[in-house]
Amino acid sequence: MHSSLARITVGRDDAPTLVLLHGITSSAISQADAINHWARRGYRVVAADARGHGLSPRWEDARLARAGDQLVDDALGLLADLDTQARGRAALGLTAAPAPIVLGHSMGGATAMVAATRHPELLSGLVLEDPSLYGTRSPSDLLARGAARERSLDTELANPAGAVLRALASATMPEAEALPSVWASQRVDPALLRTGVVAPEVPWREAMSALTIPTLLLSGDQPGSARLGAGGLEEARALGNPLITTMLIKGAGHLIRRSRRRGYYAAVDPWLERLLAPIGGTAG
């Protein structure tokens, strides 16, 4: 198992490692603010472009027919690469980082969650930022949403300068991510959008129940934007999995890290430090 995904890696090879998996129409570099934040805190940050995004391979028909599973396979390939690196360092007598913590947003969150149920030995923990919830929308609704995304991207392609200006003017867009976010949207393979796939085909409650590693599940309460919301977080708690910690970020929308930046880091940073302390020390 080997990953063909393009990635950005920042930080020392022996530092505690965070793997960032983005949502649909995004990319690794459009998480520049997050990469900088955690790199400054002493982590090694590995941000990957999902298939059909950024600089990663485009979708082929055979892979597209199993798009949800392919997203998981790609993520596991990346984690297997990091595991091989760590084993190599250990064999040479060098300090190796513990298994990484994966932070996923939306599509990336759903992908990370299912990957963790299949190969939990490759991860130390999960941060799920308002993950996509497979099983909550009909196939026709997903196709309609994919078509709407494609129309929106077509509009951006017709006027990229205007898209950049709107991104720069946004009250929630970090300046470091404005231009990369527009670039990312222009790099999306529309073949994926046409499938409507935004998550592996595993019902979200089933996946969360099966998690065997510490998990922080975040959502916001902005109507029409947050996918889980307070109700979804309560459903997650009702599953009774003691490894899942839930947290509601007041005022946040679907992309919590941008809509409530301080609240996001105030929730995530201490959780990462508590998790890493017993398994190899905190960053910094």
Image: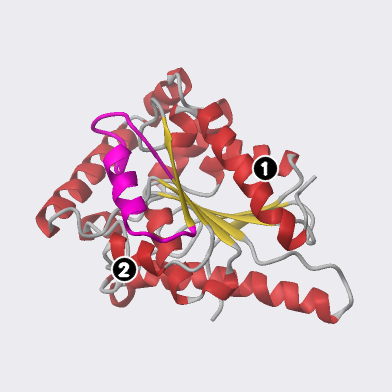
Q: Is residue 51 visible?
A: no
Magenta-drawn segment: 218-243
Kindly indicate the quadrant of the structure image that contains residue 231: top left
Q: Which residue is mark 2?
A: 67
| Of residues 57 and 197, the one drawn nearer to the viewer in this rendering | 197
State the mark number for residue 38.
Answer: 1
Whether residue 272 is situated above or below residue 248 in the rendered picture: below
Q: Residue at x 83, y 81 (%)?
A: 91
Label 2 neighbour load within 10 Å: few <14, some 14-19, many 20+: many
User: What is the quadrant of residue 230 in the picture?
Assistant: top left
**How far across and how far down the image is residue 244, in percent?**
46, 55
Looking at the image, tell me whether mark 2 or mark 1 is earlier in sequence order.
1
Task: Please tell me the numbered disc located at residue 213.
Answer: none
Quadrant assignment for the N terminus: bottom right
How would you rate the neighbour count of disc 1 (Cα within 10 Å): few for under 14, some for 14-19, many for 20 or more? Answer: many
Q: Is residue 81 above or below residue 172?
A: below
- Horizontally, residue 120 falls left or right of residue 145, namely right
Can residue 225 be found in the magenta stretch?
A: yes
